[in-house]
Image: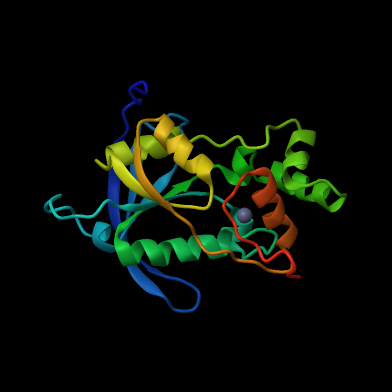
């Protein structure tokens, strides 16, 4: 049995209508929390049937949940050095279609922070891959933790989830903190000329379940 989680509670719930680039629109409920272990301002988006207040838990499907790590450059500005922006957008649409939660985790650059991520980009341009660059900067390959994600789910009264991700680490991370993951469904591969090397490295080094057309660009 995993140790009991530090208890987090829902702090506020507010409806936020979303309209993504391209015009896709959906309703969301945005949750903030008290008691998250690292003191950061992580938020959850309830989408689809979870965008409405719970009236009865009966008959609801196990929610589709994506733990999405913040990427300012990709999520907000459409950086093509990674695939975070398209992944986030796909996740919102797919979760809205099935019902579930997007957990927006404030762990930029695999947990090393925004400035360090930009430093790592500079090292990558000098020939290191994304993992080697993190190590060269004195960070671990991946410093993310899914403790706060598990706390958020507990506060949302969700104990069983289907995870939307290509990254088996996210499943292991949630299970480690007591979340029952009934299945993992992959996201699409968002390949561009600029992120091809990044995605190939992710597939090779991070054991991501990506099926990359290796001859592409
Ligand atoms: Zn990114």
Query: What's the residue at 36%, 35% (across, down)?
Result: 151
The color scheme shown is rainbow
Give the residue furthest to the bottom: 23
Q: Nearer the viewer, residue 136 or 172?
A: 172
Q: Quadrant of residue 185?
A: bottom left
Say above or below: 20 vs 35. below
Query: What's the residue at 35%, 25% (across, down)?
Result: 6
Residue 11 vs residue 148: left or right?
left
Quadrant where the C terminus is found in the figure = bottom right
Of the four image quadrants, the one with ligand 1 is: bottom right
Measured as percent of width and height from the top left, residue 104 is found at: 45, 49
Measured as percent of width and height from the top left, residue 38 is found at: 47, 30
Q: Nearer the viewer, residue 140 or 115?
A: 140
Measured as percent of width and height from the top left, residue 184 is found at: 42, 50
Quadrant where the N terminus is found in the figure = top left
Q: Quadrant of residue 97?
A: bottom left
Q: Nearer the viewer, residue 114 or 196?
A: 196
Measured as percent of width and height from the top left, residue 148 is found at: 42, 35
Query: What's the residue at 61%, 64% (across, down)?
Result: 77
Query: What's the residue at 61%, 42% (across, down)?
Result: 110
Say above or below: 84 vs 10. below
Give the residue furthest to the right: 126
Q: Nearer the viewer, residue 215 or 147?
A: 215
How many numbered marks have been drawn onto this rendered protein structure? 0
For the question of whether residue 102 can be seen, the reply is no
For the question of whether residue 125 can be seen, the reply is yes
């Amino acid at each position: 049995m995993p140790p009991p989680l530090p208890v987090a509670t829902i702090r506020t719930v507010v409806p936020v209508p979303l309209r993504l680039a391209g015009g896709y629109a959906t309703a969301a409920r945005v949750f903030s929390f008290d008691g998250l272990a690292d003191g950061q301002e992580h938020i959850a988006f309830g989408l689809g049937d979870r965008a409405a207040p719970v009236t009865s838990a009966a008959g609801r499907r196990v929610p589709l949940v994506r733990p999405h790590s913040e990427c300012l450059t990709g999520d907000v500005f459409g950086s093509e050095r990674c695939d975070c922006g398209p992944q986030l957008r796909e996740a919102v649409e797919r979760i809205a279609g099935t019902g579930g939660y997007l957990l927006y985790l404030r762990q930029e650059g695999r947990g090393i922070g925004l400035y360090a991520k930009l430093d790592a980009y500079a090292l990558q341009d000098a020939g290191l891959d994304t993992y080697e660059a993190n190590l060269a900067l004195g960070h671990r390959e991946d410093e993310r933790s899914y403790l706060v994600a598990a706390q958020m789910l507990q506060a949302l009264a969700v104990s069983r989830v289907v995870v939307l991700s290509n990254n088996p680490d996210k499943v292991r991370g949630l299970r480690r903190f007591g979340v029952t993951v009934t299945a993992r469904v992959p996201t699409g591969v968002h390949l561009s000329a600029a992120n091809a090397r990044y995605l190939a490295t992710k597939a090779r080094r991070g054991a991501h379940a990506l099926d990359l057309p290796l001859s592409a660009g």
